[in-house]
Image (spheres, rainbow, N blue to C red):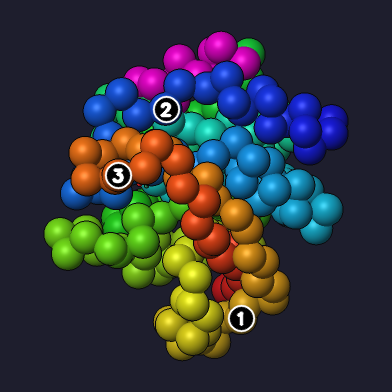
């Protein structure tokens, strides 16, 4: 499959019906999801894949379309229901599990893919618990973060290591009242982390 094809398929997926501000529910745009998944495919990392905080499922479903055995973990019931519908719509098999990433135990995961809450909202714990959980369960991590996160991430994951960092344009659609423009492009960083556990 070509990257553009994957992107077009993922564009058909439904996003959050009522995005929660506190949980920082932003869907990963199809272009960003396709970028992340192609990078992982090139590195042969799409074996058994877990999408942490899968929301409406774009990364897990995309991974399954690329041939991975995918599982999506999410705390929000409504988002999970949409994720299941989305998987059916594209005819892929993904295991969706309702769980809190903090207490998640999963075995035999090769790779975690994730777009964690960035921690911009005080009530959210941000990306720390996602990074901890990802390191506990997987050998490779592909994770999206705010620009300028390198120092924090390097320190936080030590002795595991950041292998690659990519800057990716992230089209942000207006989904909360306080957003003044309909669409704004921000830049996010994609980290590839390997774990020695
Ligand atoms: N991965 C999706 C959604 C990203 S938004 C996408 O790429 O489109 C982050 C998601 O993490 C939200 O759906 C939110 O509900 C979920 N989340 C936040 N805290 C969580 C936790 N402790 N356990 C599981 N999911 C959580």
How far apart marks 2 and 1 lie (CA) works out to 32 Å
Instruction: Kindly state the secondary structure of the residue where label 1 is placed.
Output: strand
How far apart marks 2 and 3 lie (CA) works out to 20 Å
* 85 inside magenta stretch: yes
Residue at image point 70% right, 48% down: 35
Residue at image point 69% right, 32% down: 7
Q: Which residues are magenta?
A: 81-90
Asked whether residue 99 is in view, the answer is no
To which residue does mark 3 refer? 180
Please state which of the two labelled residues, at mark 2 or mark 3, is closer to the viewer: 3
- The correct choice, above or below, for 51 with respect to 127 in the image is above
Residue at image point 57% right, 80% down: 160
- The correct choice, above or below, for 78 with respect to 3 in the image is above
Whether label 1 lies within 8 Å of ligand 1 gets the answer: no
How far apart marks 3 and 1 lie (CA) works out to 38 Å
Name the magenta segment's main secondary structure.
helix
Instruction: Kindly state the secondary structure of the residue where label 2 is placed.
Output: loop
| Circles 2 and 3: CB atoms closer than 8 Å | no
Whether label 2 lies within 8 Å of ligand 1 gets the answer: yes
Which numbered disc covers residue 161? 1
Mark 2 Cα-neighbour bin, 10 Å: few <14, some 14–19, many ≥20: many
* First in residue order: circle 2 vs circle 1: 2
Residue at image point 64% right, 40% down: 31
Instruction: Kindly state the secondary structure of the residue where label 3 is placed.
Output: loop
Mark 3 Cα-neighbour bin, 10 Å: few <14, some 14–19, many ≥20: few
Which numbered disc covers residue 15? 2
Q: Quadrant of ligand 1?
A: top left
Q: Position of residue 166 (x, y in %)?
A: 67, 66
Please state which of residues 87 and 183 is positioned toward the viewer in this rendering: 183
Please state which of residues 180 and 7 is positioned toward the viewer in this rendering: 180
């Amino acid at each position: 499959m070509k990257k553009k094809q994957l992107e077009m398929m993922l564009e058909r997926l439904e996003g959050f019906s009522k995005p929660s501000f506190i949980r920082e529910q932003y869907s990963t745009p199809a272009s960003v999801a396709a970028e992340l998944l192609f990078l992982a495919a090139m590195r042969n990392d799409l074996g058994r894949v877990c999408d942490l905080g899968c929301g409406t499922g774009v990364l897990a479903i995309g991974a399954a379309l690329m041939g991975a055995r995918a599982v999506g973990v999410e705390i929000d019931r409504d988002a999970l229901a949409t994720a299941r519908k989305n998987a059916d719509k594209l005819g892929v098999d993904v295991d969706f599990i309702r769980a809190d990433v903090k207490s998640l135990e999963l075995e035999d995961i090769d790779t975690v893919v994730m777009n964690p809450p960035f921690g911009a909202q005080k009530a959210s714990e941000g990306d720390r618990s996602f990074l901890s959980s990802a390191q506990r369960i997987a050998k490779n991590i592909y994770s999206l973060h705010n620009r300028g996160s390198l120092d924090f991430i390097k320190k936080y994951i030590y002795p595991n290591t950041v292998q690659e960092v990519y800057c990716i344009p992230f089209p942000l659609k207006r989904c909360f009242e306080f957003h003044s423009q309909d669409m704004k492009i921000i830049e996010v960083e994609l980290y590839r982390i390997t774990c020695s556990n």
